[in-house]
Image (cartoon, helix red, strand yellow):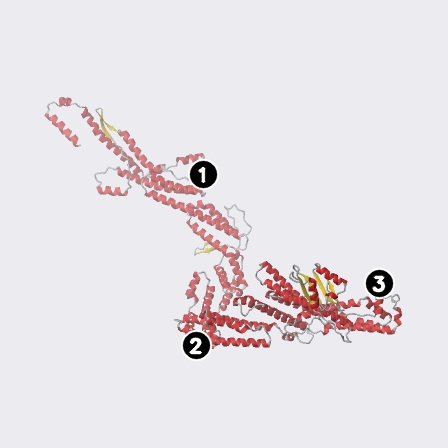
Amino acid sequence: MSKGRKKSPKDYIRLACDLHLDFSVDDITDVSSNEAISKFLEGEIRLFVWIDEKECPVVSTEALATNHLGAIAFVHSTGESLQCMTLAPRTYPEEEKKEDKEKGDAVTSDAKKSTTGTLDALQTYTRHCFGPAVHALTSSGDEEEKVINVFQGLEDKIRELDVALGQVRRSALSQIPSVNLQTDPLIAKAAAMAAEKNIPLTNLEELDLSSKLQDDEFLNKVQTGVSQWIVQIRKVTVLPSTTAFPSVDSSSSSADLEEVSFWLQLEVALQEIPQELSKPDVELTLNLLKAAKRFLATISLDNNTGLEGASSQTNDIAHFLRNYPAPALEAARDWDKISTAVNQIFDHLPKVRSSRYYDLERCAKLLEATTLTLRRRMVDVLEKSSFLFMAFSDYETEIRFPSQDVLVQFDDRYEQFVEFFLEQGRRRKPASGKTAGEVVKGMTLYHKVLQERLDMLHEFRVNHEKLLSVLKEVLGDGQVLSQVEAAPRNLLASLDVLDLSHGGTMALERAFEEYDRQMDTLEAKLAKLLRDKLTACKNAEDMFRVFARFNPLLTRTRVRAAVKEFQIQLISTVGKAVEKLQSKFTQKYEASNAAKISRLRGIPPVAGKILWARQMERQVNALMQRMSDVLGKDWGQQLEGRQLRRAGDELLAKLDAKAFFRAWVSEWEKELTNTSNSRLQSYPILIMPEGREGKLVARVNFDTKNELLFREIRQLKWLGFKEDIPRTLILVSEESVSRYPYAMALKTALRSYTAVRALVTPELELLVMPQLLSIRECISEAFDVKLSTSKAVSKKRRVRFDTRELAAWVDNLGGLVTKFEERVEQLLRACDKVDIALDLLEQVDYDGAKFQGILMSIQKSIDQMSLSGYADLDSWVKVVDDRMGEVLAKRLETALKAWNFKFMIQNEEETEETTKEQDASLPKITVPDIPVEIMLRNQEITAVPAVPIVRSQFLKCLNDFVGVVCTLPRPKSGRFEVFDSRTGEAKNHGESEECFHKLIYKVDVNIVTEAYRNVEQHIRQMNDFASQWFAYQTLWDTRVSEVTGMVGEDVDKWQQILLEAAEARSK
């Protein structure tokens, strides 16, 4: 009670007790009750108030009495507020009771009333107060996800509490009577004394009962009481065989829960009977009768109650039903939990095979009752959502798909259960005498009605959604679309679409009929609109698109009649396309463009042919789909499309690739049968003769057919033939796939090796001999042969495809071949550079610097090869040296010829033309001039330099001219060899031959001789010329007086001197 209230908490308690229990708190005189009220007002958390069986009020803060005529509870909540809860409404005992009702039964009935009243109140609070309150918190959306998950778990627990309270309430209301064995008061008093004084119950004398052994009236009375015991016990023991399965009389019935509750409660009741029989007063009664020789009563109590058989039967059935998940299904609040509960139910039902007494027909009824609970749970889940008016995508995700999952799951598991049920029926028949098949046929699955209703509603929603989608595409947003969208809500909002009664079904059918009438008014408008769109189409393709778009409307009679003429036009177009496809069948796949494209794309023949057939099949199906768009789904049954349907089916039958596939499989199986499984198939390399000469070559042991096979199988798997391919072909294909990379690597390696090996000439072979030996040694491992040059340890067996070392061996061989290719490539590049340099050496001018540059480039290539570690490089350098010497020798010889030509003294017989021809055929050379001066110094005529000096200079020029070639350095192979293995004498010998000194010996001796002769001739000419000048020395030294004195005046002498002078001058 809040602070704003004027009344005190005690006033609130007084008013609540007056209202609910019809008594005043002030009338309570019991001290403990008043103390309990005081404790509660002082802060105790709870307070129970009830009316006992004597109609007196009782108050307590500890516990509530079991039997009462009404009860309420007060609880302190947050703050100072006070809450009151009605645990059981106030009831009044009947003033008159039936005379034939036993006292025990009457007490039990009163107890049942008080118990069920309390349970009703608790279940009402749980279902209608606690559950909705927690659900409101869960769906508020204001809390975090973690908190929402906690609330959802709490909601599940509250739902389970509701189910548990219902079960307990049904148990309290059950018809199982309680056995309460009443004894004679004298015997009861004696039993109490025996317990108090620890006297054996068989000692009747000490218990003062020995005198009663002769009292027939007393014994008859006791024996009559025992007979009443038998009657009470038999009321319970006959229940297992006489109690029928609970009736399913309404949709709210919980017969499955009642069945489980009945047997579990019966088990408890039967277990209580031995406890009653073991009470001291009952045992004393039986001992008294036995001592009085009244064995009839005791034997009847032992044999006529049927307690043992009823207990064994009930225990067996209770063991089967104890864990039956009906409560889990009853408590399920979403689709996942319903699905889980259905699975658990069908997992539990086969356990009936281990139950000896639970009848098969009763098990079938249990499943029937469970389907009613399933229907009720599904309806509850559906009613929480407006599934008829929510978005269609949300409807499918949240309602349709989950519900279908539950229903389909039930159908699948039910089929399995029926098989199990029929099998059990062959082993034991139902108690009613029916066969198991008759029982199954007579079963009523109550959820099927709901399933049919959901399918009907789903079909309505799907058709309405299709109509909406068509209208949105055609009309867009508008008034008509709004009317169509609002039609289901206007017609169905006031109906309970999940009402499965006859009246609910009729109301739903009337609503659907009204919906159809409203849609008919729309049909005429759509027919006119569709005809206008078809009339506006420019070609057949546009018409096909319009028909595909408006195909759902073709189910309407008016729309179909409006587009009849357009349908006939398009049917003719499809017929021509079918005829064109038929003409393609006359061409074979092998000659078609598709086969060429398949080969270019690496598609194998069989898969390519099937792919081509599939393409043709898709074209036929596309044409059939167009016919469906134009005429509707049932176009093959219509008169206009029947012929085209037959033609399309014939084409599809011809395009069936299964027969062709089976023939291909048979051919391969036959080939695999004929193929020998020799050990040769496992060797990676084989030696085979090739060509007419039968030259032996190494070939990779991998048939191209195997490569084609696994390519075919890979493509066929993609085409959907995975399940049809025999296991043998798959194994062969997998083996080929595993071998393929190694085989391709080996093929590539051998092909590369063959191509590169052909490029290696004999003079180059020594340079790559280590690589060649490594390759030969690696290949020899495939033949278990050890080469004479190999230093490796011979292996015990050959390398095979199935050995673990194959991958390492293939990688090793590929690496060796790659290295061999690189070495040969580098070697060939060096050879090309040398060849280019030698060609250039023949063409450049006769100049030492140019020759030196070319030789340095050759030496650079040799140095690069030396650094690369080529073996036996000296031999190849010697070959290069010889070729270089030949070129230089030719250049030297040609140069000497040019020298000779330049200093040649023409004979008088040689013409000027012959001189020009020789000059054109010889290279241009440059010879340094040697200037010679005739000087008069100190009255003496001299030649500077002197003739001997000129001769030595001239010869030096010739030697320098020859030295342009002879002094060139020869190529060396070991310039980077730090530790040369040659001896000192060999080194000195090599150093003396570092240049081409001996090339002069390769020149024609006559040419060299002529060169020197030309030098001597020029020296002689120079000498003659100098001698003439030297002759004037005498004239210069002669005096005129001496000549005049010697000649005198002799005119003839003077004339002779003048003639000689003129003659000398002319010379």
Question: Which residue matches tag 2?
Answer: 562
Residue under circle 3? Answer: 196
Residue at x 62%, y 73% (from the top left corner): 446
* Residue 568 coordinates in the image, percent (x, y): 42, 76
Nearer the observer, 876 or 118: 118
Tell whether label 2 touches label 3 (CB within 8 Å).
no
- Element type where label 3 sits in the image: helix
How many residues crowd around disc 1 within 10 Å: few (fewer than 14), some, or many (20 or more)? few
Front residue of this view, candidates 40 and 733: 40
* 852 over 777 or under it: above or below: above
Estimate the spatial distance between the alpha carbons at disc 2 and disc 1, rounded to whole Å. 102 Å
Residue 977: mark: 1
Of residue 970 and residue 526, the one placed in the foreground of this image is 526
Return the disc, 1 or 3, that comes first in the chain's sequence: 3
| Residue lying at the far front of the rendered structure | 6
Q: Quadrant of the N terminus?
A: bottom right
The image position of residue 752, as x and y in percent, is 45, 52
Q: Quadrant of residue 259?
A: bottom right
